[in-house]
Amino acid sequence: MTSNQTTISEIQFYPIKPKDGLLGFVSFVLDGKFWMGSVAVFTRPNGGYRLVYPTRKVANQNINIFHPITHETGQQVETAINEKVSEIFNENYEPEQPTQNTW
C-alpha cells in the first residue's frame, strides 16, 4: 500500500522588500526527487501565507510551469512553507537582547 504523504524538505525562503502582499519567494525539494523554485509567498488578509506557483506567459495565455495536482498535496506544501516562513519572521522580529558592556 502506498502512502499519500508528501515530503517537503530543504525549504529556502528568499525575502524581498514587501510589495502588494508579496513577501518573497521559496524553493523546496519535493519527495527527495524534485527541486521546486520561484514559488511566490504572499500574506493572507486573515493571517498566514498563500503560495502562487510560477507561470509563463505564451501569447495571451498564462501556462502553469508546475503546481500541486491534488488539494491534499497543495495543503501539505502550504503547511510546510507556512511553518518555515513563520519561523523565519519570528526569528527576525524577536527583540534583540541588550549587550552588556564590560570595561
Image: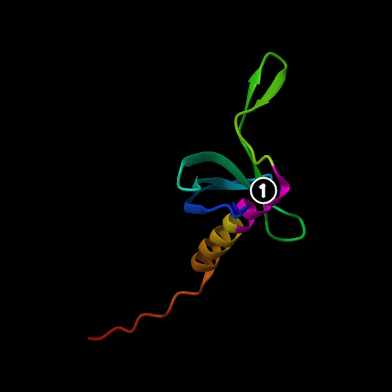
From the viewer's side, name the closer residue of 44 and 58: 58
Q: Is residue 73 magenta?
A: yes
Query: Range of the magenta residues?
Result: 70-79
Question: Could you tell me which residue is drawn at 72 percent across and 54 percent down?
Answer: 44
**97, above or below 34, in the image:** below
**16, above or below 66, in the image:** below
In this view, the residue farthest toward the top is: 59
Q: Quadrant of residue 46?
A: bottom right
Q: Position of residue 71 (x, y in %)?
A: 72, 47
Q: Which residue is mark 1?
A: 74
Specify the amino acid type for callout 1: Gly
From the viewer's side, name the closer residue of 57 and 103: 57
Question: Could you tell me which residue is drawn at 58 percent across and 62 percent down?
Answer: 83
Q: Position of residue 84 (x, y in %)?
A: 54, 60
From the viewer's side, name the closer residue of 83 and 90: 83
Taking the image as shown, residue 25 lies to the left or right of residue 32, namely right
Q: Residues within 10 Å of mark 1 (few under 14, many from 20)?
A: some
In the rendered image, which quarter contains the C terminus? bottom left
Q: Secondary structure at mark 1?
A: helix
Question: Could you tell me which residue is drawn at 70 percent across and 51 percent down?
Answer: 72
